[in-house]
């Protein structure tokens, strides 16, 4: 009788079998929603590669993994904000290429001091991002089209600067930014990346402007009615993404000790993959810096492990594509359940 009354009142028998299912569902939802599933995937990937690739767990290789993901990690910070707004940026790789060529031309041909050339490279990236934002907000172009156009423009300009020729030979101190180790582990570039992630996390979590991009991704019109300047916030998000692409161009030039017009080709797909694998939704309104870190590490560890195993680069492209598809499918299923 008491069980019937509890059922009518909306309760459940505390000793009944039904309590186990909601508890298990709640636990699995926490583990596999957002970035939890990505974290588990990273751990599993780590274990598998540790067994299959003998050199994977060496200190030298793990440092190499971090070096390989620095540029991807920098670009992914800006892409996280872009995707949270419900947008997408296909131009980050090309803008990176343009910025690194501007850096090389100003420092080698125009005779600018390196620090001035570095600031100019970041400014060029920010300008490209601003044009993306203006095209999306005022020209009403879909983000896909606006950034696709910028991708073509930036790549063409990168090749135009030196007629497709690379620029080589930077000062030793510039090369040391990515090669010299402090405490046997940290390079200046890696410390910059860590600082960017901390700043990005704090901005999204504690700043009102950071919270505004979640509101825009959840519904731009609702955000506008709530008093948020949607156009202004959107433009600044793309400016930040462009500036970070410029910074990524500087980091890549430091690592390679050269500037190449083709630099950054294919990065746009890896960036989107890292952010989506980390739990962000392509529909907007969802995403975290912590999840992006995990997504970046998954891409980096996966590529590094496949290289150690001698897997063909063409097969690697297939694997990365499959990972992107699985991540998007997981996002769709997550939204359907919610």
Image: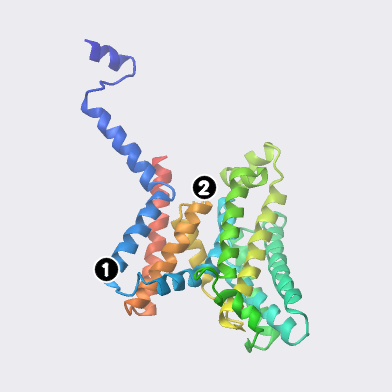
Circles 1, 2 touching at the beta carbon (< 8 Å):
no
Tell me residue 188's x, y (percent): 59, 69
Task: Classify mark 1: helix, strand or loop.
Answer: helix
Residue 264 shown left or right of residue 230 in the figure: left
User: Which residue lies at the image location 54% right of the left edge and 73% below the top edge?
Assistant: 181
User: Which residue lies at the image location 56% right of the left edge and 60% below the top edge?
Assistant: 194
Residue 315 appearing in the image: no
Q: Report the front residue among 41 and 64.
A: 64
Question: Residue 96's quadrant in the figure?
Answer: bottom right
Above or below 275: residue 10: above
Residue 234 shown left or right of residue 190 in the figure: right
Would you name the residue on which mark 2 appears? 286
Above or below 161: residue 247: above
Tell me residue 142's x, y (percent): 61, 58
Image quadrant containing the N terminus: top left
Question: Residue 178's quadrant in the figure?
Answer: bottom right
Image quadrant containing the C terminus: top left
Tell me residue 259's x, y (percent): 62, 82
Q: Which mark is residue 327?
A: none
Q: Report the front residue among 85 and 274.
A: 274
Task: Classify mark 2: helix, strand or loop.
Answer: loop
Would you name the residue on which mark 1 appears? 51
User: Which residue lies at the image location 46% right of the left edge and 55% below the top edge?
Assistant: 278
Q: Kindly report the distance in space between the C-alpha atoms of the residues bearing marks 1 and 2.
A: 35 Å
Estimate how packed mark 2 is, as few (under 14), some (14 to 19) or many (20 or more) residues with alpha carbons within 10 Å.
many
Above or below 231: residue 69: below
Q: Nearer the viewer, mark 1 or mark 2?
A: 1
Count of marks overlaid on the render: 2
User: Which residue lies at the image location 72% right of the left edge and 86% below the top edge?
Assistant: 108
């Amino acid at each position: 009788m008491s069980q019937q009354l509890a059922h009518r009142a909306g309760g459940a028998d505390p000793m009944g079998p039904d309590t186990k299912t909601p508890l298990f569902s709640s636990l699995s939802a926490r583990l596999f929603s957002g970035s939890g599933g990505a974290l588990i995937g990273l751990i599993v990937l780590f274990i598998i590669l540790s067994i299959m690739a003998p050199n994977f767990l060496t200190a030298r290789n793990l440092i190499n993994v971090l070096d390989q993901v620095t540029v991807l990690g920098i670009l992914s910070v800006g892409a996280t904000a872009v995707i949270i707004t419900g947008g997408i940026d296909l131009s980050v790789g090309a803008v990176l290429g343009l910025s690194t060529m501007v850096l090389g031309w100003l420092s080698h041909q125009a005779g600018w001091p390196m620090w001035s050339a570095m600031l100019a490279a970041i400014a060029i990236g920010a300008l490209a991002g601003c044009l993306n934002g203006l095209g999306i907000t005022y020209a009403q172009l879909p983000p896909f089209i606006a950034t696709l156009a910028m991708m073509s423009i930036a790549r063409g300009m990168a090749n135009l600067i030196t007629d497709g020729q690379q620029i080589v030979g930077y000062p030793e101190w510039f090369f040391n930014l990515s090669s010299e180790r402090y405490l046997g582990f940290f390079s200046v570039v890696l410390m910059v990346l860590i600082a960017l992630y901390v700043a990005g996390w704090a901005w999204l979590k504690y700043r009102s402007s950071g919270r505004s991009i979640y509101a825009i991704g959840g519904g731009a019109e609702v955000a506008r009615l709530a008093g948020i300047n949607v156009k202004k916030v959107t433009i600044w998000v793309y400016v930040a993404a462009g500036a970070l692409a410029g910074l990524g161009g500087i980091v890549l030039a430091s690592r390679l000790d050269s500037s190449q017009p083709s630099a950054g080709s294919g990065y746009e797909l890896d960036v989107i993959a890292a952010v989506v694998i980390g739990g962000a939704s392509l529909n907007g309104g969802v995403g975290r810096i912590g999840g992006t870190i995990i997504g970046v590490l998954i891409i980096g560890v996966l590529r590094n492990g496949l290289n150690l195993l001698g897997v063909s680069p063409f097969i690697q492209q297939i694997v990365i594509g499959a990972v992107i598809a699985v991540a998007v499918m997981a996002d769709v299923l997550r939204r359907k359940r919610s």
